[in-house]
Amino acid sequence: MEGTKTKWPIRLFNIISGSRIKIDPNKLTKATMRQSGLSNLGAEYNPEPLEVLCKSITDEARLHPFGAFMIKQKLIGQIEGRLWAEHWFRTHPEILDQPLLPVVLITGLQRTGTTKLQRLLSQMDGARGLRSWEGLYPAPIGNESETQKRINKTKLNERAVRWISPSFYSIHPIEHENFEEDVLLLDLDFMSSSSEAIMHVPSYADYLNRTGQTAAYAYEVKLLKLLQWQRPGKYWVLKSPHHLEYLDIIKTQMPDLKLIWTHRDPKATIPSYMSMLYHGRRMFSEEVVARDITDHWIPKIDRMLTKGLKDVKVLSAVKHLHFNDLLERESKIIKEITDWIGATPPSPKEESKSYYSSHRYELQDWGLTADGIDDQFGYYLKAMKSLTHA
């Protein structure tokens, strides 16, 4: 498995830097506060997740100096976003007095069509999708009508990813105006699976797995209210595979909820996702070990599916969808979904060609076999057939 060759300016930066950079959460937070002129992270803010994450990055992630620099900028953006969010909550208390819009939530394993479905449904009349720049920077910077600073920051992120790792960008293009996962909002509470996706941070992942998620989802709801205050809609269209493990919590935080679960054979999704993770991690490290990825993510995927199949039973409005049906009968499927939601189907639009990739992957690249996947995930394959052909 070969990743994108590290660009020579990054290699030069790494040589000049000479050593890995320690990421200190306290220094990071204080510096961001000084830069923003803000100091309130919210009464419910818990510094522990950021502290655990920074220690795990420093001790385990094997980042090269430029990778550490990029991750520091990412964390600074999350701290800054939370500072500005709290500023607007205090300045405009009516934000939190709003009811949360009804939520159409798309989840399913990675590489099961969740992105495609989200981008289609977000075109519906009245739909409130989450643009990439809003997910990364949900709070206005400086004044309540500001958008351009946040868009420009996201454009810079987009250009950086495209330059640093064309291979990752071809698998999952980061487009500032397109729709993205709301797991980005959980990042502002430092309680999302995005860090364990882009880095080898096993101790942080273990912390995430054994720590309750209620507070993180409660804070996401606050951010969603902040976003709908800026740009209203009739209902949210959100998506993330992360949600599979937390459907019971989500139900308590988003009571007006319709769930769509996309399904696909794990023999196809797992090697595709492993490959995406590998190319993503190569942006930050030259010491990416394929075995680290499979050893962590195969049990996690097992846990996601087991928990999801258990907790989906607590939801009253659920629609299951097979990946192949979405590809082969897109118009009919979208019509069925919009009828179920009570919405108008979106007008056909040409999707960005960058959405389609020439991504190539094989199970054997990851030391996996078809029989082994079938044995481990047989319970899900059986459930998937019954759920998508009911």
Image (spheres, helix red, strand yellow):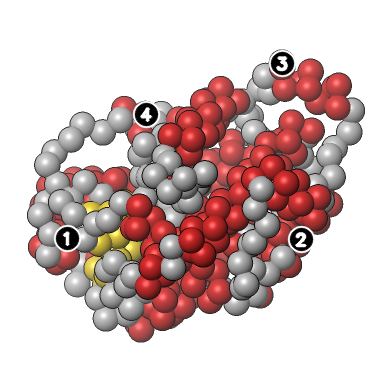
Q: Is residue 38 left or right of residue 322?
A: right
Give the spatial CA distance, label 1 vs label 4. 25 Å
Q: What residue is pinned by disc 3?
A: 8
Q: Is residue 41 visible?
A: yes
Q: Amino acid at mark 4?
A: Ser
Mark nearer the viewer, 2 or 4: 2
Name the foreground residue: 193 vs 148.
148
Precedes in sequence: disc 2 or disc 3: 3
What residue sits 84% from the left and 45% below the top?
22
Give the spatial CA distance, label 2 vs label 4. 36 Å
Q: Is residue 66 left or right of residue 241?
A: right
Q: What residue is pinned by disc 1?
A: 337
What residue sits 80% from the left and 55% below the top?
26
Residue that lies at the very extreme toward the right in this rendered image: 18
Q: Position of residue 36 (x, y in %)?
A: 64, 45
Precedes in sequence: disc 1 or disc 4: 1
Q: What residue is pinned by disc 2?
A: 51
Give the spatial CA distance, label 1 vs label 2. 42 Å
What residue sits 73% from the left and 53% below the top?
29
Give the spatial CA distance, label 3 vs label 1. 48 Å
Name the foreground residue: 280 vs 147.
147
